[in-house]
Amino acid sequence: MKTLQGLAFRLFKSNKFIVFSSIVSIAISTMLVLSMVLFSFNAQDTLKSQLKQTYGEMDLSVGFNMNQNETLTPNLIKEISQNKKVNKISKVSISHLNLNKINSEVYTVGVENDYLAESRYHFTQYLNKESVVMNKGLAKALHVKIGDKFLIENKRYTLVETVNDLTATGAAPDMLFLNQKVVRQYIQATQSNNAEATYLLIKAKKGVNPLTLSDEIKSYNKNLRIDIAEQDYGMKSNLQSLHIFTVVLSVLVLIVTSLIIISNFELLLYKMRNQFAIMRSLGASAKQISKIITIQSTVINIAGICLGFILAYFSQRSLYKWIEKLLNIPTTPSEFSMSAAVVIAIVTFIIIQLFLLIPAYRSTKVLPLKTMEKNEKLDFRYSKARVTVFKVLVGISLFLIICSQVLSTRETYGPAMLLISAVLVLLAFVLIFPILLPKVLEWFLPYGQKLFGQEFYISVKNLIPQVRKNTVIILMISSLMIIAVFGSVTLRTIQVSQQEQLKENYATPILVETRLNNTKINPTEFTKAVEELPDVKSVSNFSTLGLAEFQNEGRNINMNYAVVDLKRLQAQGLISHLKAQVASNSLIVSKSFAKQSHLKIGQIIQLGEFSNEKQSVEPIGNYKVAAIEDKLLNSADAYVDWKNKKLVDVSFELLYVDSTRIKSAVNELEGLKSQFPEIKISNYEQSAKEADKMFYQRWGIFILVIATLVVSTMVGVFNSLVNNIYSKRKEFAVLRTMGVTSKGLRKVILSQVNLYIIIGLIIGIIMGLLTTFILLLVDSGKFTIDYKIIVTVSLSMLVGSTFIFWFVGNKISSQELSIELTNDNK
């Protein structure tokens, strides 16, 4: 046994470079697998914490819709609370209470002092019957601080805490938080009902499925509206994106790690088979050879796994923080899970051990001559079978894509169908690529010779017979690019979609709103006051929405109208320029409303408004449809100008302010608060920053892991390329005997390496975009290509390879020719 151990380690010594390269490849593979699986765990934890941040500890909210005219009575609440699956309930009452200081009603939430309400609404102070909590924006507008007293519905309350504004989705709403009993009493007194609460926050007992509890509560009253925190649309969308991300990246990582192992171990396995065949021919038994294989593979595997584990640990601890600073991502991934990492490392060890043992061990059972013959095969066989399987996989993928878009069950099964089709497309490409590559190279060979010279022709000509070996490296580069493209495009698409939704709320960079429902602001005077500010470029005003009625084709139609300054809106480009002068009875209607109501330009309609005094719709006059716009602001169906004196059941709501110096303009607008104290100012820049911050908090861990995978894979690719080039030292020595200079040899090496990379990058970008397009059909819409990431990764690969292989070429060309010619070419 000691003799065999000594022989195994002597073989290590004679193949130091190969052994080191194999250990590095195992380490990279282990690091990639650990990063991917731990990423999945961390991402799940991140989304769960976001769910808790949004909804707190609650599992369900239970109540009635406002239009149902039903209330949560004490008996119904008692019945729900007595359910054995309910752990805790918290009552919430919603109303609008008058804030005396501004003489306007503010959205008010009545809450109980328990962990469900505190975690849901993010307040910490105890609320007694004289306490109030409000959002920071409202507190700033009122010039109040904690401890100040003010009147709500003519009763004195003390401000005990302020909570953050929710500006990431647009202009932040004003909110008051009072003790639930206070708000409940007010609702019961003013609305004459026995509503115990508007809705309930419910925490289920441990182990209870919220869906099951929801069904049981629904049985108490079929009209109850029950919202489950886990079924929040945005969160479900994020979880769905997470699952797709995890599955696709897992498949890609599996492909990449397999390719790294195959590429880097090819040299090791070739040497092992060669040496074992020689040893068998000299009389060594299969049992002795198998023991040597076991010793060698185990030592290499353990060393590689341990190194990979250490790299994964420090990448989780240090590399993430470095990338976080580099990319300015305000988030930190979860802690390194030691127990999970150990289990994953052991599983990885077993898989790689089998991979090392099986091909080498098989060689011990075959005659030495057969082993040597098999070792030198370079071509791919069964091309017809590969083409057939390729066609079948593509056919199945197309069928699944079509089904995911047209079947009635597409919402339920569509994502799974698209996921399977994307994976099948990748597998089909892996099968067909080795067959297409030689044909593409043969076609490109004469053009390459004309463009890049004789050395390029020689390097490509040498690649074509070695497709079997070279394909693995090109596929590895393609997989790297697919990861980069898929990750960057998906995340960029999500970010751009969020930004576009935010932009819909900001027709101009700055919005100036009134906090009061019954504001006395004169829109004309206020508009002029803002317009005179030095850093304000343009201003337009907008009213609250009024409701008018008219008849068309025998139908009664309701129309939400806004009174606006049409000239100023046109100047800001918020509506199309009208050809003719607008009369006071002109209507600008939205395209969707015109289609729905069968209205055409030039059509005259008679409008009416509901009269509270007469309790009927009173005619106002005839109005002419002057123009039809694609879309109107604030969900209005129609615009009329302030010149109109009849449609007046509205008040000033907001200004759209444009400026090239946002911060200065906002500061100037703040100065107007002394004259117009009820105004609220919000700007797109600030809201966009908040939205980006939330985006990175939610998706930062995805970005970090993708960056880690790309960097790790690039190291694996360069390691494989170095091995590949060193395996051809005898070929390069022959070229030197034929008169190729050191400069020419470097050019041959760089030509081969960069050809690998360019082909891999092009194919990877195409396959990455195709995979992303298929997966984004889940939520049909345009996807945004992140050119910066694609170009950065591509240039990094090309610049890195040029730098590394310039030195590799120098080293090979400086070796003694006689020694290189006697090298076994591996």
Image (spheres, rainbow, N blue to C red):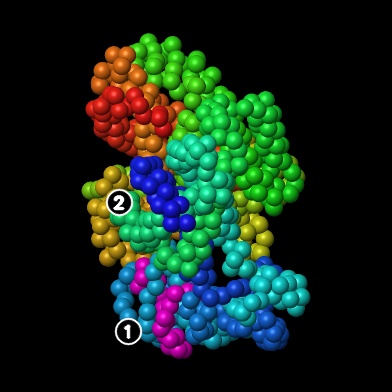
Residue 276: image location, x then y, percent: 50, 40
Q: Which residues are magenta?
A: 120-139
Single out the mark in the foreground, 1 or 2. Answer: 2
- Whether residue 146 sits left or right of residue 622 in the image: it is left
Task: Return the x and y of residue 805 as percentages of the image width and height.
Answer: 30, 32
Q: Tell me the quarter of the picture where residue 573 sits.
A: top left
| Residue 415 visible somewhere in the drawing | yes
> Circles 1 and 2: CB distance less than 8 Å?
no
Q: Nearer the viewer, residue 412 or 524?
A: 412
Determine the residue positioned at 51% across, 73% down: 56
**Residue that numbered label 1 is attached to:** 147
- Residue 715 visible in the snapshot: no
Mark 2 falls on what kind of element? helix
Total numbered labels: 2
* Image quarter of the C terminus: top left
134 inside magenta stretch: yes
Label 1 sits on what residue type?
Gly
- Residue at coordinates 32% horizontally, 14% vertically from top-left? 738
Q: Eyeballing the image, is 444 above or below 26?
A: above
Residue nearest the viewer, comparing 161 with 458: 458
Q: Is residue 801 left or right of residue 52?
A: left
Res. 137 mark: none
Whole-percent x, y for residue 540 in the image: 39, 47
Give the amino acid type for the residue marked by disc 2 in the picture.
Answer: Leu
Above or below, comparing residue 808 to residue 437 in the picture:
below
Observer-nearest residue: 505 or 541?
A: 505
Question: Where residue 79 sits: x, y (%)?
Answer: 71, 85
Going by the image, does 422 lie left or right of 658?
right
- Residue shown at 45%/71% (left/top)? 175
Name the residue beneath numbered marker 2.
326
Per the image, label 1 sits on a secondary structure element best described as loop
Looking at the rendering, which quadrant does residue 511 occupy?
Answer: bottom left
